[in-house]
């Protein structure tokens, strides 16, 4: 499908493509150059105060937690007070 570079370096993505990808006005896109080609990648914005959730260390901790739960290496508590009592070993 062909489009044209317009004033101020703007392009229009054909509706058939935006529909196929589920894109809508205002969606964020990353733009990269790969092997001499322009590549647009749908991107999700992350609020700054939640960015830590997407770090490698946080994702690794989540995966370790899932493994702990799957293998039964967890304890439960009926409330926060009891949970802290268990953590402190009292």
Image (cartoon, grey):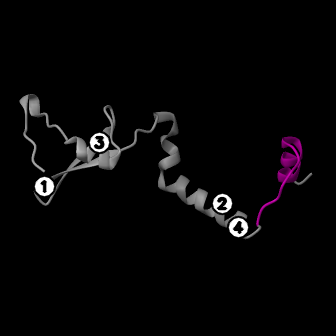
Q: Give the range drawn in magenta.
A: 73-88
Q: How far is mark 4 from mark 1, CA to CA?
A: 44 Å
- Closer to the camera in the image, 10 or 70: 10
Residue picked out by circle 3: 29
- Closer to the camera in the image, 17 or 37: 17
Q: In this view, does 53 lie to the left or right of 74?
A: left
In front: label 2 or label 1: 1
Label number found at residue 10? none
Tags 2 and 1 touching, CB below 8 Å: no
How far across and down, in percent of the image, does residue 44 sit? 40, 42
How far across and down, in percent of the image, does residue 33 sit? 16, 52
Helix, strand or loop for disc 3: strand
Q: How far is mark 2 from mark 1, CA to CA?
A: 40 Å
User: Upstream in the sequence, badge 4 or badge 3?
Assistant: 3
Residue picked out by circle 4: 70
| Residue drawn at the location 24% of the way across and 46% of the way down | 16
User: Upstream in the sequence, badge 1 or badge 3?
Assistant: 3
Residue picked out by circle 1: 37
User: Upstream in the sequence, badge 4 or badge 2?
Assistant: 2
Residue picked out by circle 2: 65
């Amino acid at each position: 499908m062909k489009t044209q570079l317009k004033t101020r370096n703007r392009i229009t993505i054909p509706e058939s493509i935006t529909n196929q990808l589920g894109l809508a006005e205002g969606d964020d896109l990353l733009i990269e150059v790969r092997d001499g080609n322009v590549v647009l990648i749908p991107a999700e914005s992350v609020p700054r105060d939640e960015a830590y959730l997407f770090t490698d260390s946080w994702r690794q901790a989540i995966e370790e937690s899932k493994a702990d739960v799957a293998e039964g290496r967890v304890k439960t508590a009926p409330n926060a007070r009891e949970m802290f009592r268990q953590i402190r070993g009292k």
